Structures are given as structure tokens and as C-alpha cells.
Image: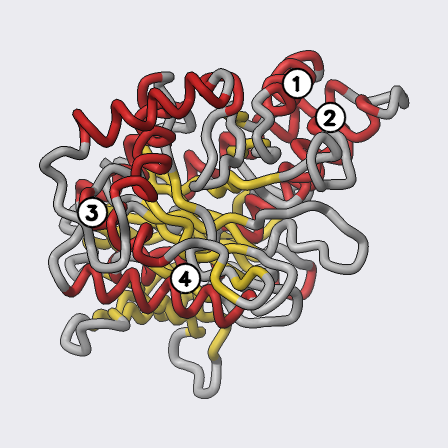
């Protein structure tokens, strides 16, 4: 993203004429009132090229982040016909070596133009399990890191996620929080299993009635599978979603999950998705690449697998992974139903970008390509506004004087950022 100029909208729908506006954001990049050449190049289709002649007009440029500044404005209307990214090259008319700036626009299908990108993390720990901070602290920190939705998922504990939701309501936290918990695949939902005798009876019932005709993969028994089957069924019975976490995490001297069990879960399609990118305390890159390779292998076989990227953060001082791993979801709105509908309908990608490292995105190609653009051109603005919001929220949870007026202004700016970036449909 070029922080000296702005271009809006950033995303357009193919085959629809749209007005594009380019402004300068710094004193040295104010656009004079004169004639310019606007060269439009599809990065995908080399035959899709056009050159327009445009005269800049004096106007007041509104920056989403900074205060308004007087500048010339380059405006033009154009119909983008090729899916994917475009380069918009601005130069002064009739002058050699007069390049001003190159901006980027992304053209999507009408279907995709109706969806908006939201970043989330559905695997977060607090001091109620093996984390270090409170539920509300982790929620506000999520906003600080640019998250739009999140879930506290302490080990076998559901209440901390509810605590975060209630505390978030008290400060009107601009972060969509879901209840959740992390459950070992070989165990169960603590409150639902009852005592060991009752749980054993439930497992016997699963084996006799639900698995009686289910063929097992090699090296897996129905007795082993029954525990996972019972857990997933119970999650669905409670109206929840079952996502398998870190399938290739190395715990001790072997994988944390029994891989034949993972094979069976994929074969039977009873889980709602897989965490293909996540944060770990060791061997995270190898574990992630194995999960990514397995995902693409399954896709090549024709399997449809919803995927997530999560931090699994415990917020420890030496191995803080929060903000390095996340899920980008393309949904109709930032609501529980739309977020999970999008994930289940393969409209999500798993992302990672450890500090100082390159971006990695896993998922359907169309969404991966789109996400790479958004991480360069849209999310830096989005994340900056989220971070500024979180600073106010931290003041509130620490009982310091907080500016609610500033918070409302930031919320309006974020809403406006979405509106002006997707002027489509």
C-alpha cells in the first residue's frame, strides 16, 4: 500500500462502470491541477490495457486515517472486465519520466463483490487454562491486532469464553466474540459426559448404534473412534461447530493427534473444518506445512474442507504468537450466522505472518489471490483503526479515563473504510 496516495474504491465488480478517485495524502504528494495520463493494466490479462487522459480537479481529500488535506483529485470512470488485480499508473501528460504513482485495484465477480473480509482467531487461551492473561484482556488485545471476531477456547472450560462476552458488552467492545472451548479429541465435553460409568455406557451406545455400519480406516478401532464421534455429535447437539485443531502438532515424540483418527474424521465428514495453520511452541512451520499439504491433497481428491488459521495463543512472554496466525473470512456481514456460514461454504482462508516473516495464505486459489491484495492494500488501514480502538478499550478495562467520543469516531471511520473500499453492486 502506498501511504502517500489513496485510491478508492479498492475493490470493484467486473463489467460494471465505477468512478475511481486518487488523492495525495502528504504535502509533497499533493496532486497539482493539470493533465495526467492514467494507464490501466490487468496483471492477469496482458491484452486488457487502456490509457485515459484526465484533468485533476481541486478538492478536499478525506483521509480515513489522517485529517483532511487540500489536494488535487484525479477522478475517472472505468469498466474493469478481467478478474484479479489491476495496476493504475499515473503520469503527467506530455512529459517524459513523469511517473507520479502506481496504485492497485482488485476486480471480483459479482458474487464475491457482495462479501466483505473479516479477520478472526478462534483458538485463544487465558489464565483459566494454560494462558497468562484474562479473557477480556485477550479479547481487547485481539482488537489491537486487527481481529474482527474471536473465541476464547480454554482447555475443557466453556465459562471463560462467556466471561469475555459479558465483559465485552460492558465496554461495548467492537469485536464479535463467540463462546467456545478446546476439547481433546480423546476426551469429551466435561459437563456432558457425566461420571465414568455413564460415559462408558454412552460410548457403548455409539459403537452399537452409530458406528455399526461404519467402515474403519486402517489402524483405527471403533472403540477409539467412538470417543471422537461422541464429542463431535455432542458439540453439534449443543448447536456448536467442531473444528479439528493442529492435526500435525508434535507433542513429545509423536503427533498430538492419532492420524488414523484424523483420516476417519475426514472420510466421514463429521467435523466442520480443520485448523490448517496455527501457532505452536515448537516445530510450528513443519506442522503447518504438513497440514497445508494434506489440505491440498484432499482438495485434489475432490474433498471440500472448510479451513481455519488460529494462533493458539497463550500470551506468554517468550513465545507470543498472537496476531501471527488468523482466519480471513469472506462473509455477507460480521454476524455469527454469516461468519460460520462463510467458513462452512469454503469462503475462508488460513493465514500466517510471524514477526519479520512473509505472508502465507492457504485456501481456494481465488480467495488466496484476493487475500494477498487485501493484506497489502486494505488491511493495513483496517488494522490501524482497530489498534486505535483497542487503546481506548484498554483504558476502560484498566479504569482509566477513556474518550468515548474518540471511540465512536474510530468506529465510524472503520465503517466508512468498508463503504468506500467496496463501492460495488
Query: Mark 1 or mark 2, which is nearer to you?
Result: 1
Residue, disc 4? 361
Determine the residue located farthest toward the bottom in the rendered image. 96
Q: CA distance from mark 2 to mark 3?
A: 36 Å
Q: CA distance from mark 4 to mark 1?
A: 32 Å
Query: Dividing the picture into quarters, in which one does residue 46 lie?
Result: bottom left
Helix, strand or loop at label 2? It is helix
Residue 337, position in %: x, y?
34, 23
Residue, disc 1? 163
Point out which mark residue 123 bears.
none
Q: In terms of depth relative to the viewer, which is nearer, 381 or 233?
A: 233
Residue drawn 50% across the image and 32% down it: 416
Residue 188 located left or right of residue 226 = right
Q: CA distance from mark 1 to mark 2?
A: 26 Å
Residue drawn 24% across the image and 37% down it: 270
Residue, disc 3? 17
Residue 386, position in %: x, y?
63, 38
Q: Earlier in the sequence, mark 1 or mark 3?
A: 3
Amino acid at each position: 500500500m502506498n501511504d502517500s496516495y489513496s485510491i478508492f474504491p479498492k475493490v470493484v465488480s467486473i463489467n460494471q462502470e465505477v468512478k475511481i478517485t486518487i488523492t495525495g495524502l502528504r504535502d509533497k504528494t499533493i496532486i497539482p491541477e493539470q493533465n495526467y495520463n492514467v494507464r490501466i493494466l490487468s496483471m492477469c490479462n496482458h491484452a486488457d490495457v487502456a490509457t485515459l487522459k484526465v484533468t485533476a480537479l481541486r478538492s478536499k481529500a478525506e483521509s480515513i486515517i489522517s485529517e483532511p488535506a487540500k489536494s488535487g483529485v484525479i477522478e475517472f470512470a472505468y469498466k474493469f472486465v478481467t478478474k484479479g488485480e489491476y495496476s493504475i499508473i499515473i503520469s503527467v501528460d506530455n512529459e517524459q519520466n513523469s511517473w507520479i504513482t502506481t496504485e492497485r485495484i482488485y476486480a471480483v465477480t459479482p458474487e464475491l463483490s457482495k462479501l466483505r473480509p473479516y479477520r478472526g482467531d478462534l483458538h485463544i487461551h487465558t489464565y483459566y487454562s494454560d494462558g497468562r492473561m484474562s479473557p477480556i484482556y485477550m479479547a481487547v488485545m485481539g482488537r489491537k491486532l486487527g481481529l474482527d471476531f474471536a473465541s476464547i477456547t480454554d482447555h475443557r472450560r466453556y465459562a471463560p469464553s462467556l466471561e469475555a462476552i459479558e465483559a465485552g458488552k460492558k465496554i461495548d467492545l467492537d469485536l464479535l466474540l463467540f463462546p467456545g472451548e478446546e476439547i481433546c479429541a480423546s476426551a469429551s465435553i466435561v459437563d456432558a459426559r457425566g461420571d465414568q460409568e455413564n460415559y462408558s455406557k454412552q460410548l457403548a451406545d455409539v459403537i452399537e448404534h452409530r458406528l455399526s455400519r461404519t467402515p474403519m480406516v486402517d489402524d483405527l478401532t471403533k472403540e477409539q473412534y467412538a470417543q471422537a464421534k461422541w464429542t463431535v455429535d455432542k458439540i453439534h447437539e449443543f448447536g456448536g461447530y467442531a473444528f479439528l485443531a493442529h492435526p500435525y502438532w508434535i507433542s513429545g515424540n509423536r503427533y498430538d493427534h492419532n492420524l488414523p483418527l484424523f483420516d476417519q474424521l475426514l472420510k466421514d465428514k463429521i467435523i466442520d473444518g480443520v485448523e490448517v495453520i496455527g501457532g505452536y511452541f515448537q516445530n510450528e512451520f513443519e506442522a503447518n506445512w504438513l497440514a497445508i499439504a494434506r489440505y491440498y491433497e484432499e482438495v485434489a481428491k475432490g474433498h471440500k474442507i472448510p479451513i481455519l488459521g488460529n494462533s493458539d495463543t497463550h500470551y506468554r512472554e517468550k513465545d507470543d504468537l498472537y496476531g501471527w496466525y488468523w482466519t480471513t473470512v469472506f462473509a455477507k456481514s460480521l454476524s455469527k450466522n454469516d461468519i460460520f456460514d462463510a467458513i462452512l461454504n469454503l469462503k475462508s482462508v488460513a493465514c500466517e505472518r510471524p514477526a519479520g516473516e512473509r505472508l502465507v495464505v492457504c485456501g481456494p486459489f481465488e480467495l488466496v489471490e484476493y487475500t494477498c491484495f487485501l493484506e497489502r492494500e486494505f488491511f493495513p488501514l483496517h488494522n490501524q483503526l482497530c489498534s486505535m480502538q483497542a487503546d481506548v478499550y484498554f483504558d476502560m478495562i484498566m479504569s482509566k479515563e477513556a474518550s468515548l467520543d474518540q471511540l465512536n469516531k474510530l468506529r465510524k471511520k472503520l465503517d466508512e473504510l468498508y463503504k468506500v473500499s467496496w463501492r460495488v453492486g
